[in-house]
Amino acid sequence: MRRLLDRRILFFGGKGGVGKTTCASAMALAASRAGKRVLLVSIDPAHSTSDIFEVPLASSEREILPGLVGLEIDAESEARRYLDEAKARLAGLFSPAVVREAARQIELTASMPGVADVAVFDRMSDLIVSRAGMYDLVVFDTAPTGHALRLLRLPELMSSWVEALARHRREASAAGAHLAAADGGQAPLVDPVLEILEARGARLSAVRAELARGDRVAFVLVLIPERLPIEESVRAAHQLADAGVTMGGVVVNRVLPDDAPGEYFRARKAQERVHLAEIERRLPSVRRVIVPQLESDVHGLASLERVSACLLADSAPGR
Amino acid sequence: MDPSIFWRNVADVFHGMALSGHRRQLRSEAIELQDLFLLMCFMDLMGLPNPAALYLIDVHPYLVEEFHLWHRRMGMDRSPLATFSCC
């Protein structure tokens, strides 16, 4: 997967507990060792990036190592931040009575389902758009598969909504302008509502276009050789294709060594071979790398570097 | 009365009738479009899921006036939404 180091954005996803954070961290480390400026972003609610690097991370960027910066996005505090910023924007624009009413409404919005997801997505979009010049590579350590895929589909869903809203607003304004002309008056020249909608729509399209760039963006699926993670990964591969996001490869994590002694390990290994063959058969056209089960937990730089080395060792599709 | 003035007045009356019909039609079209837009913006307050809810909180304050005109036009003195009071 060495060639993935030249991408601009990498997503690491997979079933909970298969080692997404380890692989995303190892890849980010490898890229920074290759001389790139790397931003590692954890969207996984079970933030463990801090634990792996033994450096506390926050919702703002913090240097982990030279060339490697990390941050952890927390859904609830992200929603909070978005809403507080919205309130601040309004404060200067409207009368105190309207601002009071709007603040009450913003609080109601905060409690609605899905708002936290959109807030995370908004932060992710912001990082994709605004950090493009600051970093060579942004690595996203995503939440478990289903959630990550929903997040990647949001720009499509949201931009069709916002575009429909803008279109209706334009039509209503045009009708209003006709009416004003018939009455001999003049329609207002600037419509702040339309301006806001168009700005949102433009940013959503930019993010959507960026995510569809197969030469710059890739999604890496992490799995372990067991039945349920395989099923979930195959589904995820289909959904990624539907969403138009390029699959960068598959990491098969925690593969047992061939020469493990003892009856127990021989039986496990035989079972594992069946699953590995299954992975080859069902995910045929993607690159695969194998990361062996290490003798100890991945924790700290030395063990992370071992994982990095495995990730960079390339294997052709169908091997 | 000068016949030419008489005919000019007749022409003005017809012109006015035609124009008011046209204007009425324009007004009802404009109002329908505005109401549809308002519905799309406030649907989350009416219990309908709106994926763009978070992105609309910047827009809502600009629509207070239009929302107020809407509920007055619909014959409701006060805002029908407990969660959105404009008057």
Image (cartoon, coloured by chain):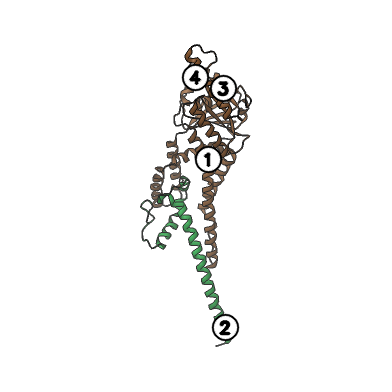
Observer-side mark, 3 or 1, equals 3
- Circle 3 residue: A290
Does A297 appear above or below A70? above
- Circle 4 residue: A300
Q: Which mark is residue A153?
A: 1
**Chain rendered green:** B
Q: CA distance from mark 2 to mark 4?
A: 97 Å
Q: Position of residue B20 (x, y in %)?
A: 51, 71
Q: What colour is chain A?
A: brown
Instruction: Report crowding for label 2: few under 14, some 14 to 19, many 20 or more residues within 10 A (C-alpha).
Output: few
User: Where's the N terminus of chain A, which quadrant?
Assistant: top right
Residue sitting at x 53%, y 52%? A166
Q: Which mark is residue B7?
A: 2
Does A93 appear above or below A248? below
Determine if marks 2 and 4 fall on one subunit. no
Q: Are marks 2 and 1 in contact (CB under 8 Å)?
A: no
